[in-house]
Amino acid sequence: MENLTLTEALIESARKKAAGQPYAYLIQQLKAIGVDNYFVKVANHKRTYTSVTGQKLILSPDMEEFEPTETFEIDAIKAAIKKINEGTISYDAFLREIGNAGIHTFVADITGMKMIYQGPNSEYEYEEDIPEV
């Protein structure tokens, strides 16, 4: 794999290549450019990407901030994940839905092919596998 420097343009290019496809296609594109994982703050969509070489790229919040709830609702979380995986809601709507279900942050562990959704504290967490494409 080529050792690329993570840039906002490179991440956006991966997003464009995966546009209109299930989420797993975005993961495939990010993996191809050397992203190991990314962390998202649900309240405002601040993202931190980490490459396989340890380089970090922090992207500024790009949506109006809202306050995720403190109540962790696993069924609502699973329903929102199902909708985004099926492509029936927008990404912004997905963030609001999981925030309203008690998710404050999530990590896409691309190397481990896992999504880890985290609630208001460490006792509330939901994890699921990222499907292969």
Image (spheres, grey):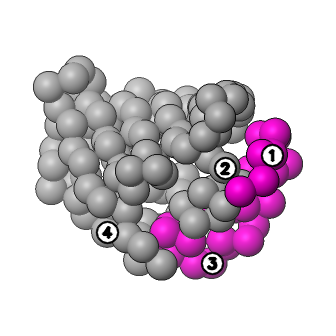
Q: Disc 2 vs disc 3: which is toward the camera? A: 2
Looking at the image, is mark 2 or mark 1 earlier in the sequence? 1
Residue 85 is inside the magenta segment:
no
Closer to the camera, 101 or 3?
3
**Residue under pointer 2:** 34
- Please tell me the numbered disc located at residue 21: none
Relative height, residue 86 to residue 47 (above, below): below
How far is mark 2 from mark 3, CA to CA? 22 Å
Instruction: Indicate the amino acid at tag 1.
Output: Leu
**What is the secondary structure assignment of the residue under circle 1?**
loop
Marks 2/1 in contact by CB < 8 Å: the verdict is yes
Please tell me how crowded label 1 is: few (under 14), some (14-19), or many (20+) other residues with Cα within 10 Å: few
Q: Is residue 56 left or right of residue 105?
A: right
**Residue under pointer 1:** 4
**What is the secondary structure assignment of the residue under circle 2?**
loop
The spot of residue 90 in percent (x, y) is 53, 64
